[in-house]
């Protein structure tokens, strides 16, 4: 299970990337995908410092390949408003995907997961569906359409 309904937040009011990432990480901890939220968050924020994670299309993909990840996961938050995710790049975000991958997982897995995601996320009608749905079950079904 890469995505689960309990890893989805469709009404995020925060415009703070730190708060959004923390919220999603704690959901992953509650589901048993990570062993320690604080350690995982350190890994995510360390990568964020070196590499902008806002990609245009209103999307941000914070990422953590970490020893604290027990099972690969994608958590999703939809912000009620688009906001500047990172001042180093000129992109706003409204669709946030937090990825967690175990440290020992081979790099092919990371590549395959991101490849499956990119097909859907670059598709305008797919993004519109993500923006309009009010049902976490539908979001899970959309991820399955991406092959996840």
Image (cartoon, helix red, strand yellow):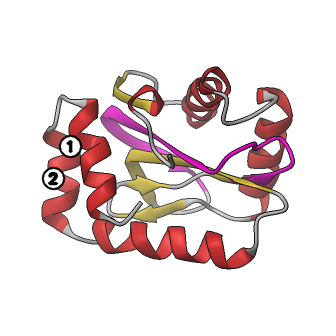
Find residue 21 and report its horizontal and vertical position in percent. 60, 35
Residue 124 to residue 20: above or below: below
The stretch drawn in magenta includes residue 24: no
Secondary structure found at label 2: helix
How many numbered discs sit on the rendered protein? 2
Cα distance between the residues tagged 2 and 1? 5 Å
The magenta segment is 64-87
Residue 58 location (% of width, % of height): 34, 55
Q: Which mark is residue 131?
A: 1
- Vertical placement of residue 47 versus 81, above or below: below
* Foreground residue among 98 and 110: 110
Classify the position of the C terminus by image quarter.
bottom left
* Residue nearer the viewer, 48 or 88: 48
Left or right: residue 95 versus residue 66 is: left
State the residue position of label 2: 128
* Extreme residue in the front direction: 1
Give neighbour class at mark 1: few <14, some 14-19, many 20+ (Cα, 10 Å): some
* Majority SS type along the magenta span: strand
Expressed as whole percent of the image width and height from the top left, the position of residue 29 reads 68, 26
Q: Position of residue 42 (x, y in %)?
A: 83, 40
What residue is rendered at 70% in x and 65% in y? 51
State left or right for residue 56 relative to residue 64. left
Could you say which quadrant of the image residue 88 lies in?
Answer: bottom right
The image quarter in which residue 127 lies:
bottom left
Mark 2 in CB contact with mark 1 (< 8 angstroms): yes
The secondary structure type at the circle numbered 1 is helix
Please name the residue shown 15% across and 52% down the image: 128
Q: Is residue 71 magenta?
A: yes
Q: Nearer the viewer, residue 82 or 59?
A: 59
């Amino acid at each position: 299970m890469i995505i689960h309904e309990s890893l989805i937040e469709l009404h995020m009011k925060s415009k703070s990337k730190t708060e959004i990432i923390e919220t999603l990480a704690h959901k992953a901890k509650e589901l048993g995908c990570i062993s320690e939220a604080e350690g995982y968050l350190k890994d995510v924020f360390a990568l964020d410092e070196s590499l902008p994670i806002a990609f245009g299309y209103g999307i941000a993909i914070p990422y953590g390949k970490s020893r604290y990840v027990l099972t690969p996961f994608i958590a999703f938050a939809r912000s009620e408003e688009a906001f500047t995710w990172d001042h180093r790049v000129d992109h706003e975000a409204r669709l946030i995907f937090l990825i967690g991958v175990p440290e020992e997982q081979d790099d092919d897995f990371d590549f395959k997961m991101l490849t499956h995601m990119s097909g859907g996320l670059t598709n305008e009608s797919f993004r519109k569906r993500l923006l309009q749905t009010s049902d976490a079950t539908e979001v899970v079904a959309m991820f399955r359409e991406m092959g996840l």
